[in-house]
Amino acid sequence: MVFIDVHCHLDFYKSDKRIFERIERAKKANVGIIINNGVNGNANQKILEMVEKYPEIKAALGFYPVDALKLTEDELDRELRLIRDNLHKIVALGEVGLDLKENPNLKTQKRIFQIFIDMAKQNDKPLIVHSRRAEAETIRLLEENDMKKVIMHCFFGNMNLVKRIIDNGWCFSIPTIIKFSEHFQNLVKIVPISQLFCETDSPYLHPDKKRDNEPANVVEAYNMIAKIKGISLGECEKKIEENYKRLFESNNQ
């Protein structure tokens, strides 16, 4: 079996030694694909370096909504140029989206998110989407753009919004906190497995409420999905691998 962590931030571990140790533990746990999501310019650059060094790491470049607001227009243009220049090296654009918890400036956030939406559509790349306390606004903007390849990262919206995402054919990445989170357990009950991925959001959201989550723990999310869906762990792994190939590999070799 090969497990997939579709959303993490290994670059947050500043030490190369600590990154290496976590990748080694992931490999021992049969986690063969780790998508590291960028949140700012420094992270994007680090991720590009990691991809060259570790075959298990796949790159998703993007900008955390609140981080993007800190940039001048010239700085934003420069960071976007880096992403465009490296589109051939990445499997997705992420982490991108909207966040009304940390900053209420929805107008500017939407303008920047629209840039990433356009880039994703033009280059047939999936979007890995952050939508904290802006779930309805995020969905509305994605619908207006007729987006097809979307993964809603750690989605905390209500079940009416969950059903809307299902109807749009988009996917959810289920964090390892599903081990104790009733919200994600209920979400998995109604979402078809063909629209599910698993994530750790490392170093956050540890399945046992400890510090420093890591990709090896993504198996915890697989176990819970298998239990809720009443299938074997092997079948769960196979279905999610099929989802990965459909969304990430159809035009991203």
Image (cartoon, rainbow, N blue to C red):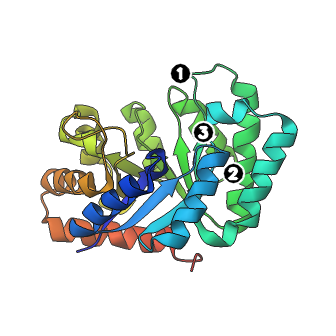
Q: For residue 192, say whether it is visible.
A: no
**Mark 3 and mark 2: Cα distance apart in space:** 14 Å
Q: Residue type at mark 1: give it.
A: Lys
Residue holding disc 2? 117
Question: Residue placed at 55% from the left, 28% from the top?
Answer: 134
Residue holding disc 1? 101
In the foreground, 40 or 247: 40
**Mark 3 and mark 1: Cα distance apart in space:** 13 Å
Q: Residue type at mark 2: give it.
A: Ile
Residue holding disc 3? 64
Residue that protrudes farthest toward the bottom in the picture: 253
- Place of residue 194 in the rendered image (x, y in percent of width and height, measured from the top left): 35, 63
Q: In this rendering, would 251 be left or right of 191? A: right
Question: Residues at badges 3 and 1 in contact (C-beta under 8 Å)?
Answer: no
- Place of residue 229 in the rendered image (x, y in percent of width and height, measured from the top left): 18, 55
Question: Residue placed at 37% from the left, 46% from the top?
Answer: 202
Q: Residue type at mark 3: give it.
A: Tyr
